[in-house]
Structure formats: structure tokens, C-alpha cells
């Protein structure tokens, strides 16, 4: 076999065995924290920055902001956590959420638990979910579970009566816990069970779920927090 023939064969085989170049993926990032400059917001920003750096199509949904004010995108990423969010992440939502996010009654036509959201806007959230291939959930763990507003989003947008959102094949959960890994294991890790079991019943049947958590938030140092942001960025680049 001549040298040119060998080169053609090598080129042909390379095209067969080489992985496909990375393709842009449609990603919905859902964030649930009432404080705009919280550490949770820094996690969201780092994730969004990494995803967009890889040319993915990223849609950002902030559940504590009225839909009219919900701008697609985050402010950017930061290597250091913001000065805010000094409250432990396992505090109750009622202790940390601003008063305006906890109305005494849900106005007629609006959805309980979702600030400023009516039924038509829930339909829009559902369409945003169905347009995504990856769902990224960013939230603090409070009392062993996600914030109530995220639970309301689950109940409204992921209602089993609407059928499976089959386009979503991957879920990545980015969450913080005030207590240690061992304490959360003893408590049953309710949020993790929801992600790994319940979400499988309403998304693609073969959906893959990844859990990226920071434990012991109550005793974390700035270095620990920066290290977790780096973990978040690496997880996004592995998509």
C-alpha cells in the first residue's frame, strides 16, 4: 500500500472513531433564592458563564422575580462569593425571604407559591422547559428540602397531568446545605430523592441526574466557597 493510500485510510478511520464535535445544547437554568446578591446567585452566575462560554443556549428562570422582570441571563460569574447571604442555608424560607415574597393570600388567577405568576405564565414556563435538553436547578437546601417556591414550580410546571417533558434528558442540581453530609444522609436527603426519583417520572424516561452539593455551609470558609464555584464550573464544562 502506497503512502498516500495509507494516509487516506488513516483519515477515513479518524473520521469514524473520533467523537463528534461538541454541539450547542438548549439549557434551562432555574434559580430559587430570594436575595439578589446571595451566594446562591453567585453559583447561578458561575454556571451560566461556563455554559455560555461553551456556546450552549442558556435560558435563565429566577423564581423569585416576577416574569415581567425576569431577564434571560445572569450578571456574570465571580471567583469570590458575594458579601450577602450571611444567613445559613438551612434556615427556614420564612426567616430569610423578603416580606413581599410571602403574601398572606394568593390573588385570584395567580398560582400559589409562585410570586407574581398567573396560569398563563405557567404555560410559558412549561414551554421553556419543553424547549430545553438540560435542566439545571440552583437553590439552597432549607429544612432538608428545596425552597417552597421551587416546590410550587415542580407542582405547576411538572404536573404529571401535562405528560412527560421528554426533551429533558439531563438534570444537574447545584445546591448548598447548612449541615454536614452525614446529617443529610441521616435525614434522608429529601431534595436528592426528588431529583433522582420524582423528576424521572415527569421528564425523559432515561434522564440522567447529577447532584453537585456543598455541605457544611454553616462552617464553610471563603476558600471552601470558591472551591465549590470551581466545581460548579467544571460540572458545566462536562456537559
Image (tube, rainbow, N blue to C red):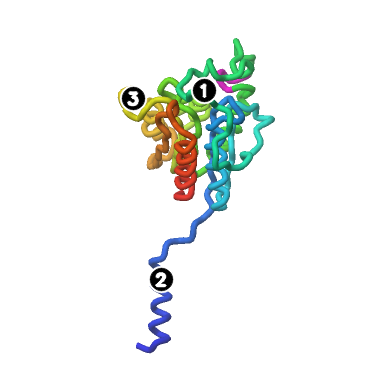
The total number of labels drawn is 3
The residue that disc 1 covers is 87
Q: What stretch of residues is rendered in magenta?
A: 110-114
> Which one is in front in this view, the residue at disc 2 or the one at disc 1?
1
| Numbered disc 1: secondary structure | loop
Residue at 48% x, 25% y is 89
Circle 2: is it few (<14), some (14-19), or many (20+) Cα within 10 Å?
Answer: few
Is residue 67 toward the left or the right of residue 159 in the image? Answer: right
Most extreme residue toward the top, as rendered? 104
Q: Position of residue 39 (x, y in %)?
A: 54, 32
Q: Check residue 44 for magenta coloring.
A: no
- Classify 10 Å Cα crowding around label 3: few (below 14), some (14-19), many (20 and above): some
Report, in whole angstroms, how far the alpha carbon at label 1 lies from the one at label 3: 19 Å
Mark 2 vs mark 1: which is more N-terminal? Answer: 2
Residue extending farthest bottom: 2
**Where on the picture, by quarter, is residue 61?**
top right
Mark 1 crowdedness (10 Å alpha carbons): few <14, some 14-19, many ≥20: some
Q: Which mark is residue 183?
A: 3
Which residue does the numbered mark 2 point to in the structure image?
Answer: 14
Q: Position of residue 55 (x, y in %)?
A: 57, 52
Q: Nearer the viewer, residue 100 or 203?
A: 100
Decide if residue 135 is in sight here: no
The residue nearer to you, when weighing 217 against 46, is 217
Q: Any magenta on residue 113?
A: yes
- Numbered circle sitting on residue 170: none
Q: Measure the C-alpha gap from mark 2 to mark 1.
A: 54 Å
**Mark 3–mark 2 distance (CA, rounded to whole Å):** 50 Å
Classify mark 3: helix, strand or loop: helix
Amino acid at each position: 500500500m502506497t503512502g498516500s493510500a495509507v494516509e487516506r485510510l488513516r483519515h477515513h478511520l479518524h473520521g469514524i472513531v473520533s467523537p463528534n464535535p461538541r454541539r450547542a445544547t438548549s439549557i434551562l437554568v432555574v434559580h430559587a433564592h430570594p436575595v439578589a446578591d446571595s451566594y446562591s446567585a453567585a453559583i447561578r452566575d458561575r454556571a451560566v458563564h461556563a455554559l455560555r462560554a461553551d456556546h450552549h443556549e442558556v435560558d435563565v428562570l429566577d423564581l423569585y422575580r416576577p416574569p415581567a422582570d425576569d431577564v434571560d441571563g445572569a450578571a456574570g460569574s465571580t471567583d469570590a462569593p458575594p458579601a450577602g447571604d450571611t444567613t445559613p442555608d438551612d434556615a427556614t424560607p420564612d426567616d430569610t425571604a423578603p416580606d413581599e415574597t410571602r403574601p398572606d393570600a394568593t390573588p385570584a388567577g395567580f398560582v400559589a407559591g409562585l410570586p407574581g405568576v398567573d396560569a398563563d405564565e405557567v404555560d410559558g414556563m412549561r414551554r421553556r422547559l419543553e424547549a430545553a435538553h438540560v435542566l439545571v436547578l440552583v437553590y439552597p437546601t432549607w429544612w432538608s428540602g428545596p425552597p417552597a417556591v421551587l416546590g410550587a414550580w415542580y407542582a405547576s410546571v411538572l404536573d404529571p397531568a401535562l405528560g412527560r417533558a421528554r426533551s429533558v434528558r439531563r438534570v444537574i442540581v447545584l445546591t448548598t446545605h447548612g449541615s454536614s453530609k452525614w446529617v443529610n444522609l441521616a435525614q434522608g436527603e429529601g431534595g436528592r430523592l426528588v431529583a433522582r426519583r420524582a423528576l424521572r417520572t415527569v421528564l425523559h424516561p432515561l434522564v440522567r441526574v447529577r447532584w453537585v452539593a456543598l455541605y457544611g455551609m454553616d462552617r464553610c470558609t471563603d476558600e471552601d466557597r470558591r472551591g465549590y464555584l470551581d466545581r460548579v464550573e467544571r460540572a458545566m464544562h462536562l456537559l
